[in-house]
Image: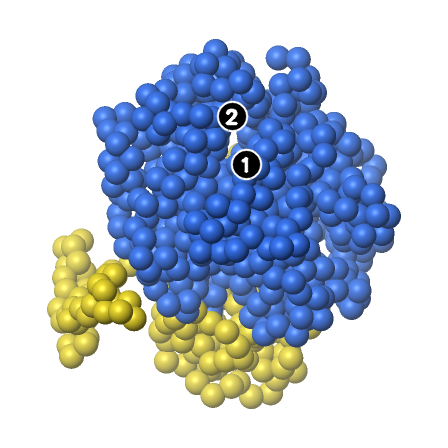
Chain colours: A yellow, B blue
C-alpha cells in the first residue's frame, strides 16, 4: 500500500485517510492441458476494529499496566471475582465490572498453567518464531491468560513476570512474559 | 456460568419422535480445482436419494425446510453461500437457514433440522453441510481458522489454531498422562487407527498405513502436536434427511430414531472457570473426590483437560435417549478427533472412561472394531470412517458425515456403499485388493460428537434402530 490507511474518530464517526483496499490484477488458473478452471482473486483489506470498553486494557499495556476487571455488584453471588482476560460485564450478573490493576499481582503470583513451543504460524503472524505460548494463572483470579514468553524455557508451574512492548502496537502482543529471575527485559520490551 | 438452575438442566424433549431417513456424502479432498461447491452438495443429495430408491426430484418433494451447515464464509469468499446452494439444489422457495458453529456446524445443522421436525413445524427437513477450504494456501487457511479464536486476545498470538489445542495437550499429557512416553504413544496410536480405517472408506481423503513411529516422527506443528496428530483440511459435502414417523415410513422402510442435544463453553479456553463436574448417568458423586491426588494438577475442572460443552451435550442427550452407560448401551461411536489429544479428552467428557483415564479406551483395545489385544470385537469401536484425521474435516459437513456413517452401520449397508468398486472408481480411486469390511456386527445404536473451536459448541447425536430404543417415548 502506498499510502498507509489511517483512521480517527470525529463526532462519533470514523474518519479515514489512505488506501483501504488494494486490488491486484487477477490471473487465470489452468489445467496442464490449458483448460480454464478458475481465476485468482487477489486483494488487500483494512478493517476498522473497535475495542469498545476493552480499550483501557490495550491502552494499559502501552503504559506498562496489566488491567483486569472485577465484579462489584453486591447482589451477585460471585461478587469479587476477578477476570483476565478483561471482560466488560460480569458473566453471572451482567453488571458492568470495575477495572482493577493486576500488575503487582502478576509480578508476584503469575505462573505457567500450560505452554507449547511452535515454529509454525498462520499467515500474518508478527511474532518471532519459535513462539513460546504460555497460559498464565494468577492467585485470586478465576480465569487464565493466554500469552507468550520471551525469556526462559517454559515449564508448568514456573513463575513468570510481565514485560511490555516499548513501542506499543496496541494489540495483545504488547504483553509478553519472562522467567521471574530475569534481570534485564528483552530488546524492545520493558518491565 | 458455573452453576446450573433446574430449568437449565431440564432434559430436552422432542414433541414427537424424529427419524433419520437417509443420508449422503461427496468425495472429500484437500482441493477440488475442477468442481464448484454446488457439485459436491448435489453429489451428496443424489446419494441420499438413490440410497432409498428415489430420484432427487422425488426426495425433494418431501423436504419442507432446509438447514445448511457452512462455517466459514471467508474460506469460500462467498457470503450467503446457503442461498446459492439452496437455489442450485432447486429448493427455492422453501425456508432455509445457515448454521455456523465452527467445527460443530454439521452437528448443529442436524440439531436445527431435528428440532424443526420435533416441533411439528416440518414433517421432513434437510440438513446439508459443506466447506470450501481450498481457495487459499494452507498458511492463510491457518490464519482463517485462527480467526475462530478471540481476535483481540488470541488470534494475534501466532495465527495458528493448533497452538490453542497444543496447550491443552501439554497440560493433559503432564497431568493425566503423567508426562509418560507411553501416553504420547497412545495419542499416536489414535492417528494410526484412524488413518488405517480410512483405507477402507472410498470417500476418505487420507488413507494411510502408518505406524506410531511415523506419527512421532512427523513434523511438529505445535509441540507436542505433530502433523499426523492433526485433522485434515478438506473440501466436501454431506447431508441427512430427517422426518416425523409417518413421513419417514412413507419415504423408506427402515428409518432410524435420532436424538440430538447441544452444549457450549467459552470461545477462549482462558475463560474457563473452575466448577463441579456435571455427572453422567454412569458416574457417582464420589468418583472424582480424589482426582487431584491421583493426578496432581487435575484439580481444576474443566481446566484445559476437559470440554464442558462435550460433557453437557452428552449429559442432555443420554437422558433424552435413555443411555445409562455409553460403552454398554452403544455399539460404536464417531468422535470429533480434531487432534489426537482432543479425542482422548472427549472419551472422558462423554463418559466412555472417567476423567483422567481416557487413554485406557485406546490401550484396552476397546476402540477398535477388532480388539488387537483380544482378537475379539472391540467393546465400542470408534471412528471407523477414519474420522477427521483420516477421512476429512470439511467443517460444515463433518458432523453430518459422522451421522451418515453411523446410520450406514445400523442399516447394515456400510459394506454396500464402502465396498462398491464403482464408487471407488467414480472418485478416481481403485478399491484396495485387501479391502476390509468394517461393518459393526449387530449395530443397533451409534453416537456422533460434533465439536467446535476449543470446545465452544458441541453436539451429541444418537442414532438408534427403532426396535432397540432404550426408553419409551
Image quadrant containing the N terminus of chain B: top right
Asked where in the image residue B411 lies, by quadrant, the reply is top right
Check if mark 2's residue and mark 1's residue have beta carbons within 8 Å: yes
- The chain to which mark 1 is attached is B
**Label 2 – label 1 distance at C-alpha:** 9 Å
> Where is A28 relative to A83, above or below?
below
Of residue B181 and residue B418, the one placed in the foreground of this image is: B418
Residue matched to label 2? B20
Count neighbours of disc 2 (C-alpha within 10 A) and say few if under 14, some if 14 to 19, many if 20 or more. many
Q: Position of residue A88 (x, y in %)?
A: 42, 49
Residue at (46% x, 62% y) in the render: B154
- Residue B280 numbered tag: none
Q: Secondary structure at mark 2?
A: strand
Of residues B447 and B241, the one nearer the viewer is B241
SS of the residue at dot 1? helix
The answer to whether marks 2 and 1 sit on the same chain is yes
Q: Is residue B15 visible?
A: no
Q: Nearer the viewer, residue A171 or B440?
A: B440
> In this picture, is B92 found above or below A149?
above
Q: How many residues crowd mark 1 within 10 Å: few (<14), some (14–19), many (20+)?
A: many
Asked whether residue B80 is in view, the answer is: yes
Residue at (17%, 72%) from the top-left corner?
Answer: A24
| Circle number at residue B403 | 1
Amino acid at each position: 500500500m502506498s499510502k498507509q490507511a489511517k483512521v480517527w474518530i470525529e463526532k462519533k464517526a470514523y474518519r479515514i485517510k489512505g488506501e483501504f483496499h488494494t486490488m491486484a490484477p487477477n490471473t487465470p488458473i489452468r489445467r496442464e492441458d490449458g483448460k480454464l478452471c478458475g481465476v485468482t482473486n487477489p486483494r488487500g483489506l483494512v478493517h476498522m476494529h473497535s475495542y469498545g470498553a476493552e480499550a483501557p486494557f490495550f491502552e494499559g499495556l502501552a503504559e506498562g499496566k496489566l488491567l483486569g476487571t472485577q465484579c462489584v455488584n453486591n447482589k451477585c453471588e460471585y461478587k469479587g471475582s476477578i477476570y483476565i482476560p478483561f471482560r466488560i460485564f460480569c458473566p453471572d450478573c451482567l453488571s458492568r465490572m470495575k477495572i482493577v490493576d493486576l500488575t503487582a499481582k502478576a509480578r508476584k503470583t503469575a505462573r505457567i498453567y500450560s505452554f507449547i513451543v511452535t515454529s509454525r504460524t498462520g499467515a500474518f503472524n508478527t511474532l518471532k518464531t519459535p513462539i513460546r505460548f504460555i497460559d498464565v494463572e494468577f492467585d485470586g483470579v478465576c480465569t487464565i491468560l493466554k500469552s507468550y514468553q520471551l525469556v526462559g524455557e517454559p515449564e508448568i508451574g514456573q513463575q513468570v513476570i510481565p514485560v511490555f512492548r516499548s513501542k506499543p502496537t496496541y494489540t495483545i502482543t504488547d504483553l509478553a512474559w519472562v522467567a521471574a529471575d530475569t534481570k534485564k527485559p528483552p530488546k524492545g520490551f520493558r518491565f | 456460568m458455573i452453576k446450573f438452575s433446574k430449568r437449565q438442566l431440564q432434559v430436552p424433549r422432542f414433541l414427537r419422535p424424529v427419524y433419520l431417513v437417509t443420508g449422503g456424502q461427496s468425495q472429500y479432498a484437500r482441493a477440488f480445482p475442477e468442481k464448484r461447491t454446488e457439485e459436491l452438495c448435489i453429489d451428496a443429495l443424489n446419494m441420499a436419494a438413490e440410497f432409498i430408491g428415489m430420484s432427487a426430484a422425488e426426495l425433494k418433494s418431501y423436504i419442507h425446510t432446509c438447514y445448511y451447515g457452512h462455517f466459514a464464509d471467508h474460506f469460500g469468499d462467498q457470503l450467503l453461500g446457503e442461498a446459492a446452494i439452496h437455489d442450485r439444489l432447486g429448493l427455492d422457495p422453501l425456508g432455509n437457514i445457515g448454521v455456523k458453529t465452527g467445527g460443530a456446524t454439521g452437528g448443529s445443522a442436524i440439531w436445527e433440522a431435528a428440532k424443526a421436525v420435533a416441533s411439528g413445524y416440518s414433517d421432513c427437513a434437510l440438513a446439508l453441510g459443506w466447506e470450501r477450504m481450498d481457495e487459499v494456501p494452507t498458511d492463510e487457511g491457518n490464519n482463517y481458522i485462527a480467526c475462530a479464536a478471540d481476535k483481540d486476545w488470541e488470534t494475534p498470538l501466532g495465527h495458528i489454531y493448533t497452538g490453542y489445542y497444543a496447550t491443552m495437550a501439554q497440560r493433559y499429557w503432564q497431568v493425566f498422562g503423567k508426562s509418560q512416553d507411553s501416553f504420547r504413544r497412545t495419542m499416536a496410536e489414535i492417528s494410526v487407527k484412524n488413518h488405517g480405517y480410512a483405507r477402507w472408506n472410498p470417500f476418505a481423503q487420507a488413507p494411510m498405513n502408518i505406524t506410531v513411529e511415523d506419527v512421532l516422527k512427523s513434523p511438529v506443528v505445535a509441540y507436542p502436536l505433530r502433523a499426523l496428530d492433526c485433522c485434515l483440511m478438506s473440501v466436501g459435502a454431506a447431508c441427512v434427511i430427517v422426518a416425523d414417523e409417518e413421513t419417514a415410513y412413507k419415504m423408506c422402510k427402515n428409518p432410524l430414531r435420532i436424538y440430538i442435544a447441544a452444549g457450549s463453553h467459552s470461545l477462549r479456553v482462558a475463560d474457563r472457570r473452575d466448577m463441579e463436574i456435571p455427572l453422567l448417568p454412569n458416574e457417582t458423586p464420589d468418583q472424582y473426590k480424589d482426582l487431584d491426588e491421583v493426578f496432581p494438577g487435575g484439580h481444576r475442572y474443566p481446566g484445559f483437560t476437559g470440554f464442558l460443552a462435550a460433557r453437557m451435550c452428552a449429559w442432555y442427550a443420554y437422558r433424552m435417549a435413555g443411555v445409562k452407560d455409553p460403552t454398554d448401551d452403544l455399539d460404536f461411536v464417531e468422535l470429533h478427533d480434531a487432534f489426537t489429544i482432543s479425542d482422548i479428552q472427549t472419551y472422558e467428557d462423554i463418559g466412555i472412561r472417567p476423567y483422567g483415564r481416557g487413554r485406557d479406551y485406546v490401550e484396552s483395545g476397546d476402540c477398535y472394531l477388532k480388539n488387537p489385544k483380544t482378537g475379539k470385537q472391540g467393546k465400542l469401536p470408534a471412528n471407523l470412517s477414519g474420522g477427521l484425521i483420516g477421512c476429512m474435516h470439511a467443517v460444515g459437513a463433518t458432523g453430518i458425515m459422522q451421522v451418515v456413517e453411523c446410520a450406514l452401520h445400523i442399516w447394515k449397508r456400510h459394506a454396500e456403499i464402502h465396498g462398491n468398486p464403482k464408487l471407488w472408481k467414480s472418485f478416481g480411486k481403485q478399491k484396495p485388493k485387501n479391502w476390509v469390511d468394517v461393518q459393526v456386527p449387530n449395530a443397533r445404536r451409534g453416537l456422533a460428537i460434533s465439536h467446535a473451536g476449543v470446545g465452544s459448541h458441541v453436539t451429541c447425536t444418537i442414532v438408534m434402530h427403532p426396535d432397540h430404543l432404550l426408553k419409551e417415548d
